[in-house]
Amino acid sequence: MPVLFHIAAPPSLGMIRGNQPDDPVRFRFLGSPNQPEELQATEDLQTWTTVWYSLPLKTSQLLVFEDHDKAASGSGFYRLVVD
């Protein structure tokens, strides 16, 4: 009998920038049940820092985070890590 594997698609991370320079960057994504999520940021793609995390959820939920900290360089990169 063949063995079937279900590979879940990675979560989609949406980013919304504010209209004003001092507005926070807002992130939205669907949190998965029983998995912690971390949002990480970097300026150089070498050193990543966790800027937000979620404990494991009981059900899927829309999660929102606002990053009020601006990178010193004025630019930054983000990634969502799901364990």
Image (spheres, helix red, strand yellow):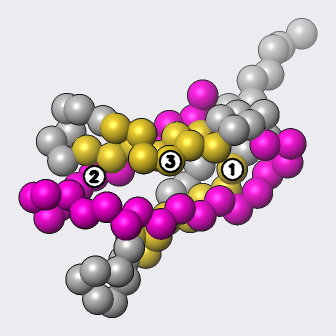
**Residue beneath disc 2:** 77
Q: Distance between the residues labelled 1 and 3?
A: 13 Å
Magenta highlight on residue 20: no
Q: Position of residue 1 (x, y in %)?
A: 89, 10
**Residue beneath disc 3:** 52
Q: Do the residues labelled 1 and 3 touch (CB within 8 Å)?
A: no
User: In the depicted view, which residue is nearer to us: 59 or 12?
Assistant: 59
Residue 13 numbered tag: none
List the single residue furthest toward the bottom. 19
**Residue beneath disc 1:** 31
Which residue does the image show at 52% across and 40% down from the upper left?
38
Which residue does the image show at 56% across and 43% down from the upper left?
53
Q: Where is residue 32 in the image (x, y as percent from the top left)?
A: 73, 44
Q: In which quarter of the image is residue 67?
A: bottom left
Q: How far apart are marks 3 and 2 (CA)?
A: 14 Å
The kind of secondary structure element at disc 1 is strand
Which residue does the image show at 65% across and 59% down from the upper left?
63
Front: mark 3 or 2: 3
Q: How far apart are marks 2 and 1 (CA)?
A: 20 Å
Q: How many C-alpha atoms fall within 10 Å of the one at disc 3: few (<14), some, or many (≥20)?
A: some
Of the 4 image quadrants, the one containing the C terminus is top right
Query: Is 32 located above or below residue 18 in the figure?
Result: above
**Amino acid type indicated by mark 2:** Phe
Q: Position of residue 70 (x, y in %)?
A: 25, 63
Magenta highlight on residue 79: yes
Q: Earlier in the sequence, mark 3 or mark 2?
A: 3
The kind of secondary structure element at disc 3 is strand
The stretch in magenta equals 57-83
The kind of secondary structure element at disc 2 is strand
Which residue does the image show at 38% across and 73% down from the upper left?
24
